Structure formats: C-alpha cells, structure tokens
C-alpha cells in the first residue's frame, strides 16, 4: 500500500482520467465507501442522525454522495454547507430532492441551526476540506469547526473525516488551530504522508484506506509504501525442515560495557528470537561473568577493556581475528561514549579487510562515534543497516533533532541516498529507506516503546534477519514491523506504560508465527 503526497495523488487521478475513470466516477465510489464506514459507527442506519459538514470542493462532493446513500438507507441526514458551493450543483440537488435537511452557514445567524443539530448528538461527517487546504482556516469554516469540536469534547460526538480532518496538511502533518479532530478518517485512494507525520496523527484517529476506483499499477513510481502484514509475511525467511543452525546464519555482536551490560543481553537475545542460528557476544572482560550467566545460549568472546569498562583499542585484533567466522556483525548496543571507542570503531568498521561485503547493523554508540569521523560513509564498504533515533540522526546529519523530526521522510531518504546504505529512522511510524529511494513506513505509533533498551531489541532482530539471508532493506523492514507488532500485542494487556524491553523478546517469535498463519 503506497503512501502519497498531494501532488502524487493529483497525478494518479489525472492518469485515472486518461484511462477513462472520470472524477465523477471516483467521487461516486468514494462517497459509497464513506457511507459504508459511517454505517459501521452507528448501531443501525434507520433513523440514525448524521450531520454532514460540506465544503466548497471535491471533498464536499464526496460528502454529498455519502449523504445521498445514507439517506437512501434510512438515516436522518442533515447537510450543513459551511461555504457556498458552485451552482448548479447536481450532487447537492440529488440529496435535496430526497428531502434531506439542508442549512447554509451564511443563512444561519449565531449558528442556531447547527447548535440544534449538534444537540441531537449525531455522527458528524467532516467533508469540508481535504487535500485542497492551502491557507489558514477562517470565517464560517473556522467557526463551524470550533463549534463541532467543542461538542465532540463536551458530548463525545463521533467525527468521521473524509480523506483528512479539515485543517490537517496532507504533506506536512501540520494542524491549523481550528482543525476538527476525527475519531475515524477514511483515506480516499491512498493514505497521505500527513496522516503519519506529527502532529497529524493526533487528529486523524483510526485511519481506514478506501478504494475509490483508481486503476491498479498507476502507483509504480511512488517510492513510499506502508509495511503491511502481507508484505512482511512475504519477506519472512524460509525455515526448511532439514535445517541446522548454520542454515540460519551467525551473528557477532560487539556490544556492552560496564555501564550498559543490559544492552548486550537484549541485542543478542533479539537476534536469536528473530531466528538466527548462532549468536556470539564480544564484550569487555569484566562483564563476561554477568552476561555468561544470563545469556545461556550465546557463545562468548571476552575482549580487552579500558579502566572504565569499555572495549579497548587492544581488543581490535581479537575482533578482526574472528570476523571471517560470522555472517553478520552487529555493533553499537551499549558500547558507551569513551573517546577511545571512536578509534576502535573507526578501524574496525572502516579499515578491516574481513568486513568487505559482510552485512552490518550499526546502532546507538556506533552511530554516535561514526558521526565524529569525517566522510565515514565513503569508507564503509559493507552492506549496512543503520538504526538511528532522531537525536543520533541529527548528529550524523550535523543537524538538530527538531529539524529531523520536522522532515522525517526527507531526512531518512537523504541519509540513505548520501550514505548508500539502508537507514531506519526510529520513532512513531518508523521509516526504512534504501539507497535507491524506496522507503517503507511502519504503521505503528506506540508510546509503550518509549523505554530504554527497545532500540537494542530492534537492532538485534535486524541482525538476526540479516543472518538468515534477507537484504538489508528487507531485514530492516521485517525487524521494525515485528518489533512494533510485539509492542502492540503486549500493550493490549499491559497498556501504554510499563512495558520493558525484555518483554518484547518472547513476543517477537509469536508475531512471526502469527504472520505466517495469516499468510496461509
């Protein structure tokens, strides 16, 4: 499922027109879809009260078609025209001819009729403005939205938005102060970038994409797609019956320090839980006894360390000596900020012949140290998955977290293109970008994941999937999806607070199992 900008949506609608699918046909199918979803919000259409807020353009036209169907099905439909519409208006006439109640904002002093309708606590369909919003909301539209928004807050009136909540910018996710927040948004044709770009999701509610009749394969040039269960299922590594541990690859994790021993545990276990055949941990000698007792299934390579408990430059040859024995190298989880580590990682990652074409996952402190090495990306020859959160991405791009967050899609695509690597920008609706511009959006935003260690689990899962032969882009996609899906499943019982990173480990294989079951 592709996710589009306003320009891309208009282009596909124009292509549909060239294929003989008229704007009127698209609008008719959109209105029917909206009416179908509206019915799902009410107990029964017969006698149900529905208030349709109608704007001046195509979004209003979609709402008028939906109103016609709802009235035909027995609902008590009221149209409230927030601004005048062009005349003649055949779609409005069809609804009026059926006897639906119609009010116009310019003829409604003090919005008395609107207030009277809201007092009946109807389902409100917001068909005022969609992707065409180009300036601040004002006048009748702003006043109407504020009144409806107040009723939604005070009385719990449900709001269904047509394509976008009015006031939400479809490309940037910005919200006008008068934005009417929705409980459900029916995305027409395709979800829009603004649905997933904050603060946009706070106004979108539950997002439901609806087919409006755009012919298939017109979206082939769109670079951004959503990671769906079907897509992820198709990417999952195969597990032949005659497998052995070598079939599923080996991971060497260079992770942990005296201060962050837990990060090494989480990353290694996540690699196993994602399906890797063998995981070895290279960690400072002093934390080996702790981790050896906790990581029963992991093999260990205790390495030389500094007085502060970080991996030492003298461990470099120990690490290089074993590189050829592993399929994937995972570096960064819990390594620490010791200045000597910049030299260790620079030499290990950028100067080790044994890393040529060996897949890497770089996370956390590996990214922070690379950010201090000039032109690091020109010297990184391995196929790599980088997994920065916004702060780490800002350091790598010599920017600020606020700027990165304000243009998440552009930031991750620019980074992947410049570095010629697969990049995951973590956070709500994580993004995975490939060097060629293809990008996948993870359809989850869950505050339960905002806790220490969950990033180590993600990095470990990506390494485990790489070890099983997935490409960096596909491994990152699957890791992000099953990681977030695990959090969703746990949140259904735990709520959105109190989840800890360790909780994710056993849930990850359950999510893989569930995806495989859905695929049958």
Image: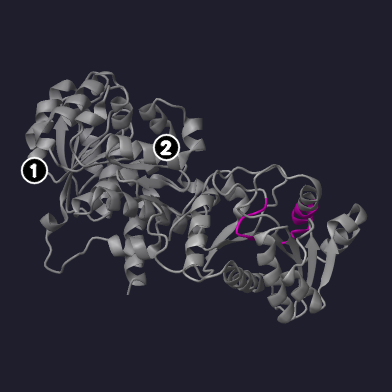
Earlier-in-chain disc, 1 versus 2 = 1
Give the percent coordinates (x, y) of residue 248: 16, 56
Give the percent coordinates (x, y) of residue 169: 60, 46
Residue at position x 21%, y 21% from top?
343
Is the C-beta separation of discs 1 and 2 under 8 Å?
A: no
Residue beneath disc 2: 411
Give the percent coordinates (x, y) of residue 324: 8, 40
Looking at the image, residue 464 sits to the left or right of residue 410; the answer is left
Cα distance between the residues tagged 1 and 2: 35 Å
Residue 453 in view of the camera: no
- Marks counted in the figure total 2
Question: Which of the two residues, 367 or 504, is positioned nearer the viewer here?
Answer: 367
Question: Which of the two residues, 450 or 409, is positioned nearer the viewer here?
Answer: 409
Question: Which of the two residues, 369 or 93, is positioned nearer the viewer here?
Answer: 93
Residue positioned most to the right: 109
Looking at the image, residue 181 sits to the left or right of residue 490; the answer is right
The span shown in magenta is 147-166
Looking at the image, residue 144 sits to the left or right of residue 516; the answer is right
Residue beneath disc 1: 325
Residue at position x 25%, y 27% from top?
376
Report helix, strand or loop for mark 2: helix
């Amino acid at each position: 499922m592709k996710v589009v900008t306003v320009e891309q949506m208009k282009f596909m609608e124009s292509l549909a027109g060239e294929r003989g699918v008229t704007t009127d046909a698209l609008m008719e199918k959109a209105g029917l879809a909206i009416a179908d979803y509206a019915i799902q919000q009410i107990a029964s259409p017969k006698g149900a009260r529905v208030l349709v807020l109608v704007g001046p353009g195509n979004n209003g036209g979609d709402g008028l078609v939906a109103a016609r169907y709802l009235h035909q099905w027995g609902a008590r439909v009221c149209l409230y025209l927030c601004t005048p519409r062009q005349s003649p208006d055949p779609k409005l006439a069809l609804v009026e001819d059926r006897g639906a109640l119609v009010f116009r904002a310019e003829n409604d002093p003090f919005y008395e009729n609107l207030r009277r309708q809201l007092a009946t606590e109807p389902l409100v369909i917001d068909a005022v403005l969609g992707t065409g919003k180009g300036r601040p909301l004002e006048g009748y539209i702003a006043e109407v939205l504020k009144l409806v928004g107040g009723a939604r807050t005070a009385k719990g009136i449900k709001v269904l938005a047509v394509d976008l909540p009015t006031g939400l910018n479809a490309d940037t996710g910005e919200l006008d102060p008068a934005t009417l927040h929705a409980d459900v948004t029916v995305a027409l044709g395709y979800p829009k970038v603004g649905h997933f770009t904050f603060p946009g999701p706070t106004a979108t509610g539950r997002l439901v994409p609806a087919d409006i009749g755009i012919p298939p394969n017109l979206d082939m040039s769109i670079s951004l797609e959503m990671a769906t269960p079907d897509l992820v299922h198709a990417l999952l590594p195969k597990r032949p019956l005659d497998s052995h541990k070598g079939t599923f690859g080996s991971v060497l994790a260079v992770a942990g320090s005296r201060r962050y021993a837990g990060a090494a545990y989480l990353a290694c276990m996540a690699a196993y839980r994602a399906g890797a055949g063998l995981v070895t941990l290279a960690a400072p000698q002093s934390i080996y006894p702790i981790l050896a007792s906790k990581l029963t299934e992991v093999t260990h390579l205790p390495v030389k360390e500094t007085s502060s408990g970080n991996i030492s430059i003298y461990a470099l040859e120990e690490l290089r000596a074993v590189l050829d024995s592993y399929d994937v190298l995972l570096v960064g989880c819990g390594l620490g900020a010791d200045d000597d580590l910049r030299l260790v990682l620079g030499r290990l990652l950028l100067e080790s012949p044994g890393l040529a074409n060996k897949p890497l996952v770089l996370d956390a402190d590996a990214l922070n140290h690379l950010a201090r090495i000039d032109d690091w990306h020109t010297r990184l020859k391995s196929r790599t998955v980088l997994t920065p959160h916004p702060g780490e991405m800002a350091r790598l791009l010599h920017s600020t977290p606020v700027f990165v967050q304000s243009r998440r899609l552009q930031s991750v695509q620019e980074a992947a293109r410049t570095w010629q690597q697969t990049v995951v920008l973590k956070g709500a609706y994580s993004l995975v970008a490939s060097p060629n511009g293809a990008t996948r959006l993870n359809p989850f935003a869950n505050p339960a994941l905002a806790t220490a260690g969950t990033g180590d689990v993600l990095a470990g899962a990506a390494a485990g999937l790489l070890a099983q032969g997935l490409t960096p882009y596909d491994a990152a996609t699957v890791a992000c999806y099953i990681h977030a899906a695990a959090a969703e499943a746990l949140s259904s019982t735990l709520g959105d607070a109190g989840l800890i990173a360790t909780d994710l480990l056993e849930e990850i294989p359950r999510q893989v199992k569930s995806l495989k079951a859905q695929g049958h």
